[in-house]
Amino acid sequence: MEVVSFFAGAGGLDLGFIRAGFNVSWANEFDRDVWETYEKNHLHTKLDRRSITEIDPADIPDCDGMIGGPPCQSWSAAGALRGIEDKRGQLFYDFIRILEAKQPKFFLAENVAGMLLPRNRKALESIKSLFRNAGVGYELSFKLLNASDYLVPQDRKRVFFVGYRRDLGRSFEFPSPVKMKLSLRSAIGDLVENAIPARDGNYSNGSACPFPNHEFFVGGFSSLYMSRNRVRGWDQVSYTIQAGGRHAPLHPQAPEMQAVDKDQKRFVPGKEHLYRRLSVRECARIQTFPDDFIFHYKNLAAAYKMIGNAVPVRLAQAVAQQIKKDLE
């Protein structure tokens, strides 16, 4: 089945669908920092570099499905909380505009858990209604998922919208959680020894990395960062991989941070050398990207952003497999 992808980023969602047996023939991404990474890792997908606001549905190939994760910063609990009032939040409407014109058999849209905050309730219900009534209409399923329930070694809660075109007479049921949890040890235990710090200004070491992308963001830790523990142990799942290197979780080789005050932590005295941020490759592993998926960037900020914004590959694959089973 043919799929087109919007807000594709580095392509975690796309790779999950490809692994489930779909063909992602066309993708759209406006962020120039991602283009090289996407194109060099998705050789059989045509990348459209325009803003979705500029795209005529006639420019998009016919497809069985539309997938994408409209930008989430405006919905995030950690962001400005402007939601649909923010121009980035309004990009949901462009996704729905194209959905209405193309009328594929199914669609999938992913976003942050902040959409569920009470202040966003009215906008969320509006989006659900627009999905249900797009064109001939879609049978909508909506759920908050934690990636750690689907063999992703990370606590990462995101909302998913999945719709089947109403004339198909089907409804989507999300796959059941897997009982087993994958630990940080299973994901990155073999990468302890050879990580290297970024160059001055957090520029990449490039080919000097002993293992592809295995370099970590350097610089001080803000009072906000030091307000809570940032270390998960080897036998736990990771904290959420965020879209910024400065706030990346700390490596599990370090002991849990000590409390100084209610909202103030410190590194264990004498163990300070063990505290470093997870490397780009470690974050990619935790997001379940394979090691042959190479990220291209000059500054590590761009690397952490594209990885942190991605849908974990294994989570995307679990949802995609259920869609394929239903529609075939």
Image: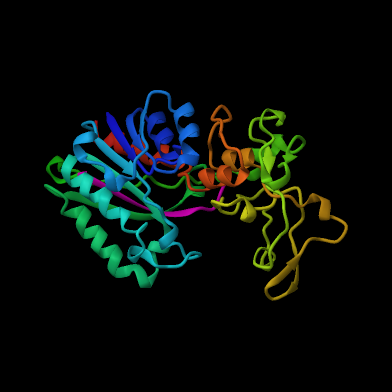
Q: Principal SS element in the magenta part?
A: strand
Q: Which residue is most to the top?
A: 44
Can you give x and y, in whole percent of width and height, for residue 161 in the image? 31, 51
Q: Quadrant of residue 144?
A: bottom left
Q: Which residue is most to the right?
A: 270
Identify the residue at horizontal 35%, vertical 68% (top origin): 120
Q: Quadrant of residue 315?
A: top left
Identify the residue at horizontal 69%, vertical 55% (top origin): 231
Can you give x and y, in whole percent of width and height, for residue 242 in the image? 55, 52
The boundaries of the magenta stretch are 153-164
Drawn side of residue 4 relative to residue 285, left or right: left
Q: Which corner quadrant holds the C terminus?
A: top left
Drawn side of residue 299 relative to residue 91, left or right: right
**Which of these two is toward me, 195 or 47?**
47
Magenta segment includes 59: no
Identify the residue at horizontal 20%, vertical 50% (top origin): 139
Q: Quadrant of residue 23?
A: top left
Q: How is the image coloured?
A: rainbow
